[in-house]
Amino acid sequence: MRGWKFWLGIVVGVSALVYFSRDLEISAFANSWRRIQWFRYIEGIFWFCLSFWLRCPRWKILLAGVGRISLNVITQAFFVGMLVNRLFPARLGEITRCVILKQSHQLSLVGLLTTVAVEKAFDSLALLSLCLMALAFLPAGELPGGFSAFVEENRGRIILGAVSLPLILLVMAWVIPLLRQRPDSFRRLPGYEYLGRMLLSVHEGLKVLQSWRETLGAVVLTAVVWGLLVRSAWCAILSFGWDLPFSAAVVLCASIGLAVMLPQAPSFVGVYQVAVQWTLVGLYDVPLQEAKAFAVAIWILQIVPVGVIGFVCLRMLGTTLSQAAAGAVVKESAGG
């Protein structure tokens, strides 16, 4: 586990944390915390936890082609995986949750990991859509002159593209199997040698989506998951009493989503806070110390409650954190 990914994540995280802390003023930071509206803050925790729980029925849909597993077991494995993600680097929790299901139901680990890959494809498209939405809502005055004019002139097209992107996966999951049922027609496609093989490779990644119902269910749940994430961020903004537009929550979620894709220290410490600070100060003129207090507050909102749920699920599974993580480390070392 202590390979280059671990050390790169530690270096990036520590560097970002040092940058975030270097101009921190404790008294102004503490005053910002004293003004928090706790009802709104707790509401934000609720929406965030709900958004993560809804990933469990979505994963159950994707697991239908691998085996029959109860939603209760899927939920426990999922949240234990999220706990491991918060305590260890390199997103080891994604392997952990698959190893738990493999051990409890004797399923194919490759099949389980494939469903996680498809799940990440849904989330990647959702994040891309959210980034386009964020681009459309960015304050025009904060963008470079020529780019600002382009955004102003094309906001409608950008929003339409963002809404349409999730439909791409739905269309591909349905059309490609139809093409494969007609191999002669498939071979007559222009550029078959390149395009045909590419489509076949894409279909391999989508083969767990066997019907319109399963695909549409996963798309709808993905939209709800990300909508609740935005709602959670909006509640966090309201808890600080700022007069910001709702679109600020969209921009903030897109910034966080892009930031946590970088190599990370455990629990995204450092990079997460810097991304939030830059977004609020640079785009919305939030005072620096208030932005720092908010960065810590929303990090706690999104990291701690899911970790606590993971500990509870760990106990329900009758295993320990070291056993769960060790199984994932072995599989990662063996499979790369």
Image (cartoon, helix red, strand yellow):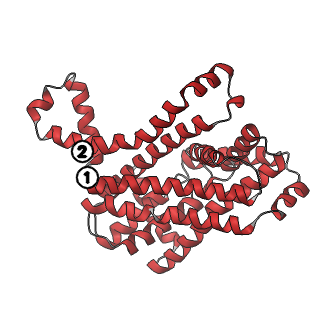
Amino acid identity at mark 1 = Trp
**Where does residue 305 sit, x and y in percent of width and height?**
61, 68
Depth order, front residue of 35/314 = 35
Depth order, front residue of 223/108 = 223
**Where does residue 210 sit, x and y in percent of width and height?**
23, 53
Q: Which residue is mark 2?
A: 174
Q: Is any part of residue 79 visible from this angle?
A: yes
Provide the secondary structure element on which disc 1 rests: helix
Packing grade of label 2 (10 A; few <14, some 14-19, many >=20) is some
**Where does residue 196 sit, x and y in percent of width and height?**
21, 30
Residue at 19% x, 43% y is 177
Packing grade of label 1 (10 A; few <14, some 14-19, many >=20) is few
**As drawn, is 244 to the left or to the right of 68?**
right
Residue at 32% x, 58% y is 62
Q: CA distance from mark 1 to mark 2?
A: 7 Å
Residue at 72% x, 38% y is 283
Q: Is any part of residue 335 visible from this angle?
A: no
Q: Earlier in the sequence, mark 1 or mark 2?
A: 2
Provide the secondary structure element on which disc 2 rests: helix
**As drawn, is 314 to the left or to the right of 173?**
right
Quadrant of the image occupied by residue 47: bottom right
Q: Work out whether 191 lies above or below 304.
A: above
- Mark identifier at residue 212: 1
**Where does residue 284 sit, x and y in percent of width and height?**
74, 41
Residues at circles 1 and 2 in contact by the CB criterion of under 8 Å? yes
Residue at 45% x, 52% y is 223
Depth order, front residue of 273/130 = 130
Depth order, front residue of 210/25 = 210
Quadrant of the image occupied by residue 141: top right
Amino acid identity at mark 2 = Trp
**As drawn, is 257 to the left or to the right of 168?**
right
Q: Residue furthest right?
A: 27
